[in-house]
Image (cartoon, grey):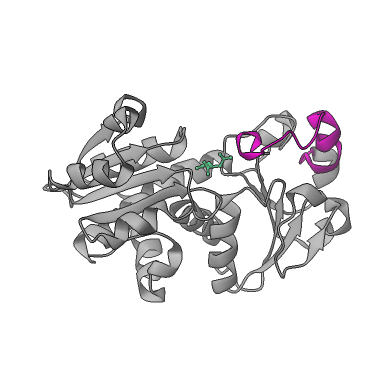
Amino acid sequence: MQHLVDTNDLSDKQIQNIIKDAKRFKKQMPNALLRDKLLITLFFESSTRTRSSFEVAAKRLGASVVHLDPSKSSTNKGESLSDTFANLCAMEPDGVIIRHEYNNTPQKLADKGLTTVINAGAGSYAHPTQALLDYFTMLEQFGDVRGKTIAIVGDIISSRVASSGIRLFKRMGMNIVLVAPKPFMPDMDLPKYEKLDDIIDSVDVIMSLRAQLERHKAPIFEDYDEYAKEYCITKERMKDRDILLLHPGPVMRNIDISNEMLEDNRCKVLEQVKNGVFVRMAILKCLLLDS
Ligand code: NCD
């Protein structure tokens, strides 16, 4: 039984196959490869893109999907997550797709060996399907990402997108630089900058991140317009540089990225969402069919 807690659960060969399949699926929708499969989605945190993307991906492959809304589930009546999970597994799904606020929840559930566990975002630790779709989006642009430099900009310390991305992009031979104000900067052995303008001439990709206000114990900035002056990706800052602009969403307009840059051809935010479906289709195929 294979799980996806983070991308290091996948071999190089599996990642190559996922990318190849996603590319193929984007050209032409495949047959209902997962016709007999049943997946359960269990999201303990809000989600727009990831949950619907998994559901669309599963349905495009002919799988059935059941969603359990935790706010209306028995975890609300005092049942432990572990018991809720065991009960769902008694219905014999082929996989459970889980999002949770704790870093180690997907691994804990995977260790029970009851069904395939797919991490759809855990705490600030990992969001492997987002990392893979971001990698796919960069590959589409560059063909090969080795030696390319990505600047990750914003609330890096709270971001599971950044943590999973950093591990995967490093593995794929990219250079990574971190750009953030001190309270958002993680303690990582990577080049760090407080100002994007100091490094912008050397980057091929900017990944902008949302300030994860819901994860801050106390407000970090009083005024996000002040923060935006330094970190918002605007046309004035980008000029006509040939830089790919990514963001995992949700985008805080004019704080993370300006309205104008969201309309710019270099901004791939909606292409990332589109690619997310094909990449998740390929991931489900890999995990559930072992192919
Ligand atoms: C992110 C998440 O929830 O980790 N979004 C996503 O899944 N595409 C990032 C965020 O909430 O800012």
Res 190 seen here: yes
The quadrant where residue 45 appears? top left
The residue that appears at 80% across and 46% down in the rendered structure is 238
Does 227 appear in magenta? yes
Q: In this view, does 126 lie to the left or right of 27?
A: right
Q: Measured from the top left, where is residue 6 in percent x and y?
A: 44, 61
The residue that appears at 32% across and 43% down in the rendered structure is 81
Q: Nearer the viewer, residue 198 or 178?
A: 178
The quadrant where residue 188 appears? bottom right
Q: How many labels does the image show?
A: 0
Task: Establish if 90 lies above or below 258.
Answer: below
Q: Measured from the top left, where is residue 230 in percent x and y?
A: 85, 42
Q: Nearer the viewer, residue 218 or 69?
A: 218
Q: Measured from the top left, where is residue 84 in percent x and y?
A: 25, 40
The single residue placed furthest to the front in the displayed view is 78
Quarter of the rendering occupied by the N terminus:
bottom left
Does 14 appear in magenta? no
The residue that appears at 45% across and 42% down in the rendered structure is 274
The residue that appears at 60% across and 54% down in the rendered structure is 162
Q: In this view, does 270 lie to the left or right of 88?
A: right
Q: In this view, does 32 lie to the left or right of 175?
A: left
Give the magenta-colored segment's residue range. Answer: 212-234
Res 63 seen here: no
Quarter of the rendering occupied by the C terminus:
bottom left
